[in-house]
């Protein structure tokens, strides 16, 4: 885990991607969601369109694009094995995760007991429950990306921004 005083945490807070990549290269690769009793063995489920992030450089780029701050209210859609979740938790932002897979949700609940976890289908979830001023992030499955974007656009007044792969979708100032 990233600790507040570690070089990785400082690099994330400062949005310094190069420093984050250097600190990641000095350490052995991070294994996400390894529980003390038994490592998580979870194969991607086709019905959910799951694809799990594992490349530390890609994860660092995503976190850099999100640039989480302590006063942010972030909603992570489909956290999966927690590749993006871990640095978001370490940023001390107000984090809510929405996961449809009950097995992954159980693992996430165990690892991040202080994070609000909603076990639901994001396409059926009522974003009004989260209030206003949220940032929506995630490694979206292709099979739901278009319907999810339309759903999120219906709630544009609640969403500040949605960092995406090639930039940032800003809904209002």
Image: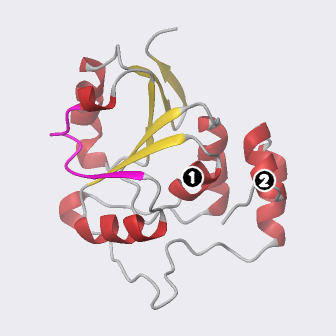
Q: Is residue 3 above or below residue 88?
A: below
Distance between the Cα atoms at labels 1 and 2? 16 Å
**Label of residue 18 in the image:** none
Tell me if 125 is positioned left or right of 132 in this view.
Answer: left
Is 125 inside the magenta-drawn segment?
yes
Tell me if 74 is positioned left or right of 65 in this view.
Answer: left
Residue at image x 66%, y 66%? 1
Q: Residues within 10 Å of mark 1 (few under 14, many from 20)?
A: many
> What residue is pinned by disc 1?
89
Q: Quadrant of residue 58?
A: bottom right
Q: Out of 143 and 161, give the one closest to the viewer.
A: 161
Q: Out of 4 and 81, give the one closest to the viewer.
A: 4
Residue at image x 44%, y 66%? 81
Residue 11 at x, y percent in the picture? 80, 47
Is 91 inside the magenta-drawn segment?
no
State the SS at label 2: helix
Q: Earlier in the sequence, mark 1 or mark 2?
A: 2
Residue at image x 46%, y 10%? 172
Residue 109 at x, y percent in the picture? 38, 65
> What residue is pinned by disc 2?
20
Image coloring type: secondary structure
Tell me if 20 is positioned left or right of 157 in this view.
Answer: right
Span highlighted in magenta in the image: 116-126
Q: Quadrant of residue 144?
A: top left
Kindly check if marks 1 and 2 are in contact, taking CB atoms under 8 A apart as contact. no
């Amino acid at each position: 885990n990233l600790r507040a005083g570690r070089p990785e945490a400082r690099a994330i807070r400062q949005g310094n991607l190069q420093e984050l990549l250097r600190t990641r290269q000095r350490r052995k690769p991070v294994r996400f969601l390894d529980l003390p009793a038994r490592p998580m063995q979870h194969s991607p489920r086709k019905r959910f369109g799951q694809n799990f992030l594992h490349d530390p450089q890609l994860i660092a780029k995503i976190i850099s694009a999100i640039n989480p701050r302590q006063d942010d209210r972030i909603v992570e859609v489909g956290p999966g094995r927690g590749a993006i979740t871990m640095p978001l938790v370490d940023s001390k932002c107000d984090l809510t995760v929405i996961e449809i897979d009950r097995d992954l949700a159980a693992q996430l609940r165990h690892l991040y007991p202080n994070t609000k976890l909603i076990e639901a289908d994001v396409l059926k979830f009522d974003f009004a429950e989260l209030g206003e001023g949220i940032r929506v992030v995630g490694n979206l499955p292709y099979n739901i990306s278009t319907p999810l974007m339309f759903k999120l656009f219906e709630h544009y007044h609640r969403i500040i921004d949605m960092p995406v792969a090639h930039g940032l979708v800003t809904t209002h100032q």
